Amino acid sequence: MTDSLITTPFGAQTTAAEVLADVDLTGRHAIVTGGTSGIGRETARALAAAGAEVTIGVRDPAAGARIAEEIAPAGGPGTVRATMLDLADQRVRTFVKAWQGPLHILALNAGVMAPPLQRTKEGWEMQFATNHLGHFALATGLHSNLAATRGARVVAVSSVGHVNGDVLFDDINFEQHAYDPWAAYSQSKTANVLFATEAGRRWASDLIAVNALNPGRITSTRLGRHIGDIANSPASFDATSTDVSWKNIEQGAATSVLLAASPLTEGVTGRYFEDCNEARPHQPGVRRGVAAHALDPQHAARLWQISVDMLAAAATTA
């Protein structure tokens, strides 16, 4: 964490539309994962409304096409289209190979939270596979497309849940430890921040900015579908807490689009934001800020190599 934190005029109640009110993204190409619902949908809508050509990665192409039509701007240069993309399936490579031309914005938004134990065909724990590895494969696979723009931005949607734990480097897939859905979720969200930390370092010479963020506690999204009634969820979901920002979907997408397209964050990389500003270090007992373990450069480099190795091993057996 640097001594000088990045601040903006925006805050917890700012909407995505307000962040991009004076931004023209005409001619820019963007990809948003998880763009059919929640803050991913609003991120895609806001980018398109500002003039971007947006591709949403979807698991259901027919449903994705309907959503794309719904959120595309009625007039102006912005467009939205849907393309097949399942982050838990290593056919992510198919999406990457099909992408032609430059890529200006990559919003790594899709995710799952606290499901019962599930594994991919490779045996990977589903939250780590979806929230981190699938996005890692997508971002690294599109590196040359991002580098071609000399100013691309990658946005990794993490969570305040990352403060609950580091990556379990000795047992990432919960083969030795008893599976805990919240420990697995925390691990995957820490991985999102570590990815931004390491990619920000590796890709700085390519002028690719990579940042992570906590969108806040968002009401009415499908992310929490596995946890039931929010009142019965862990203490981290206490609706009475003053340490977190409860937001609607339009407010929840604001930090994503700030990092994706605002001139206020041009050139900023390898950092973690919340409520449209760079987060302060996490303090025990407070559900805000960024944990030191998520910014650890040695952990970031270690996770990067592990991710490369896991994907390479999967490719040889596919």
Image (spheres, rainbow, N blue to C red):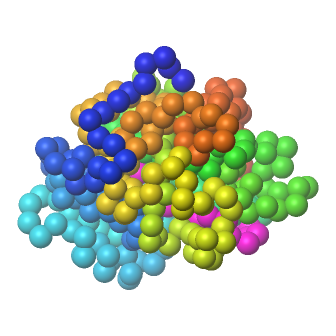
Q: Position of residue 153 (x, y in %)?
A: 37, 39
Q: Residue shown at 67%/37% (left/top)?
A: 284
Query: Is residue 115 magenta-colored?
Result: yes
Q: Residue shown at 88%/61% (left/top)?
A: 178
Q: Is residue 178 left or right of residue 19?
A: right
Q: Looking at this rendering, what residue extends furthest in the left direction?
A: 75
User: Considering only vertical position in the picture, is 42 above or below 226?
Assistant: above
Q: Position of residue 83 (x, y in %)?
A: 39, 68
The part of the chain drawn in magenta is 107-121
Q: Residue shown at 60%/34% (left/top)?
A: 282
User: Considering only vertical position in the picture, is 83 above or below 302?
Assistant: below
Q: How many marks?
A: 0
Q: Nearer the viewer, residue 6 or 52?
A: 6
The image quarter in which residue 128 lies:
bottom right
The image quarter in which residue 4 lies:
top left
Q: Quadrant of the N terminus?
A: top right
Query: Is residue 307 magenta-colored?
Result: no
User: Considering only vertical position in the picture, is 122 above or below 163?
Assistant: below
Q: Nearer the viewer, residue 219 or 155?
A: 219
